[in-house]
């Protein structure tokens, strides 16, 4: 049976994250996205330590769509090097898994 995954990514603003999240759900690449605004990131970029405020997005999807989600995020993202991490899930409640799979199924 197909497994569910989380795709974790960050966005420079809640507005940009919401636009991308809506597109992912509309295209049936994600059953749901969770957007958590107000994250502070500290990171090294081009030799300097930087600080930025971002929004976290957790994309709930099926494993077989992870590559397509990654491609879509890259196309919509304003960052040169967006954080995109695909995380397998060890366990998902069965009815919730069915919902994720159903919402990401191709519709004819």
Image (cartoon, rainbow, N blue to C red):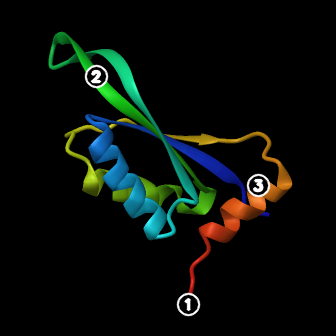
Q: Quadrant of residue 53?
A: top left
Q: Residues within 10 Å of mark 2 (few under 14, many from 20)?
A: some
Residue wearing tag 1: 108
User: Pointers 2 and 1 in contact (CB under 8 A)?
Assistant: no
Q: Position of residue 39 (x, y in %)?
A: 38, 22
Left or right of residue 85, residue 5 in this image: right
Residue wearing tag 3: 96
* SS label for mark 2: strand
Residue wearing tag 2: 53
Mark before the other along the chain sequence, 3 or 2? 2
* Residue lying at 27% horizontally and 36% vertically, measured from the top left: 13
Q: Position of residue 18 (x, y in %)?
A: 36, 49
- Residue at far top of view: 49
Judging depth in this view, the residue of 91 and 36 nearest the camera is: 36
* SS label for mark 3: helix
User: Pointers 3 and 1 in contact (CB under 8 A)?
Assistant: no
* SS label for mark 1: loop
Q: CA distance from mark 3 to mark 2?
A: 32 Å
């Amino acid at each position: 049976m197909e497994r569910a995954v989380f795709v974790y990514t960050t966005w420079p603003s809640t507005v940009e994250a919401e636009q991308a999240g809506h597109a992912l759900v509309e295209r049936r690449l994600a059953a749901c996205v969770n957007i958590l605004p107000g994250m502070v990131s500290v990171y090294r970029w081009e030799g300097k330590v930087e600080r930025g405020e971002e929004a976290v997005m957790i994309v709930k999807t099926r494993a077989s769509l992870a590559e397509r989600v990654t491609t879509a995020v890259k196309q919509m993202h304003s960052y040169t090097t967006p954080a995109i991490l695909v995380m397998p899930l060890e366990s998902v409640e069965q009815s919730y898994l069915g919902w994720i799979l159903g919402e990401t199924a191709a519709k004819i």
